[in-house]
Image: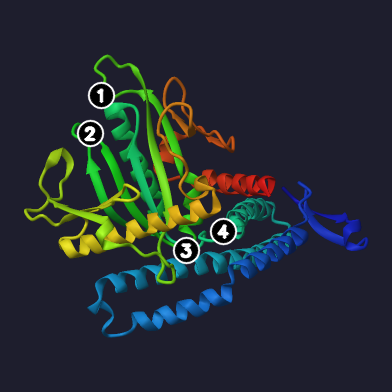
Amino acid sequence: MLAAAVFDTRHGGAVVWADVAGIDYDAEIKQLLATMKTIGSVLNIDRMRGEIADLSEQVAAPDLWDDVDSATRITGRLSALQGELDRFTGLEARIEDLGLMVEMAQEEGDADSLADSERELNRIKKSVESLEIRTLLAGEYDEREAIVTIRSGAGGVDAADFAEMLMRMYTRWAEQHKYGVEVYEVSYAEEAGIKSAEFAIHAPYAYGTLSVEAGTHRLVRISPFDNQGRRQTSFAAVEVVPMLEQTDEIEVDENEIRTDVFRSGGPGGQSVNTTDSAVRLTHLPTGIVVSCQNEKSQLQNKASAMVVLKAKLLARKKAEEAALKKDLKGDVQASWGDQMRNYVLNPYQVVKDLRTGHESGNPSAVFDGDLDDFMEAGIRWRRGADKVDA
């Protein structure tokens, strides 16, 4: 690929450098920088820097770890915000570097360097497009952290195994983005997999991003639990609610909560500890049940369970007020006819979202956390659906 001088009327008849593929790098870079400026305005980068400075002061306090729960939240928030800022500033730097790369390649007539520039331009465009998705998250709770609940549905042991695969998929996605994951409770199935799991994703906009994952997920594969090697269809439900904040007004009458304590358990019923430290809260008026067993202390588990319970009650309250329950939780049945995404491993391999039409021919990568494209498509789809409803 060689650099060539071309006559471009968009620049007032001036001669500009482009490659033989017709790329006007000057225009492309200006457009990218303009888009980044818009993104920075929407994300309020200055406010983000201010919050990072404030959190950094709190982290430096000598008594930070006197309150472990508070310290964990502060350090997690700081890490997530710093990661978001680094992502933004890193992209800006890459765009500036691209300009220098192109300028040097054009001056030297270096075809290989121009080819590298084109590849980097395409990578940057993809990254900017991904970051631009964040500007579509303008819902009331979109910037919150998220609480994710996964439940096995129809399909027996295969469904339990599928639920565990989904839990790993979301935790791997979070790990790849350096987001904190806090597991509240896992209920293991007898033979394999899990009956249910509840965990938090600690990151800015985690709820807005993950909320499009709520719904029924369907897996089709040759069952590893069927000695006749038959194909099995199984289902699992994903529910996502926003994390509660101190400013949220949600009151819970202690008299309306039944508290049960039990011993934490692991796969196959193996005892994890020998005391009744795990806690299950049942909100009697609504029937909402929340369990937590990740802490050694019964009091700590009860406090964590109460956080989840209040978050679910808030989601329920807001959904009822808006008469749009599916916006926050979805009417998730985990059975035939209402799935939002199919994971097919046999007779062919594909993962397809039935709402957006987005698909991947690499289920292994998806189950390993490669979910960004699905989430971005979901966010765009939801934005379009909101406009139609409006």
Q: Amino acid at mark 1?
A: Phe
Structural crowding at the residue carrying mark 1, measured as other residues with C-alpha within 10 Å and reported as few (<14), some (14–19) or many (≥20): some
Q: Amino acid at mark 2?
A: Ala
Disc 4: which residue: 139
Vertical position of residue 151 compared to residue 243: above or below: above
Q: Disc 4 to disc 2, how far (Cα)?
A: 38 Å
Q: Disc 1 to disc 3, how far (Cα)?
A: 39 Å
Q: Secondary structure at mark 4?
A: loop
Disc 1: which residue: 225
Nearest to N terminus: mark 4 or mark 2? 4
Q: Amino acid at mark 3?
A: Pro
Q: Disc 1 to disc 2, how far (Cα)?
A: 9 Å
Which of the labelled discs sits on residue 192, or is there none? Answer: 2
Q: Amino acid at mark 4?
A: Gly
Residue drawn at x 39%, y 39% as measured from the top left: 237
Q: Is residue 19 left or right of residue 265?
A: right
Q: Secondary structure at mark 3?
A: loop
Disc 3: which residue: 204
State the image coordinates of residue 208 (x, y, percent, origin top left).
Answer: 51, 55
Q: Disc 2 to disc 3, how far (Cα)?
A: 33 Å
State the image coordinates of residue 327 (x, y, percent, origin top left).
Answer: 52, 48
Nearest to N terminus: mark 3 or mark 4? 4
Mark 4 or mark 1, whichever is nearer to me: 4
Q: Disc 3 to disc 4, how far (Cα)?
A: 13 Å
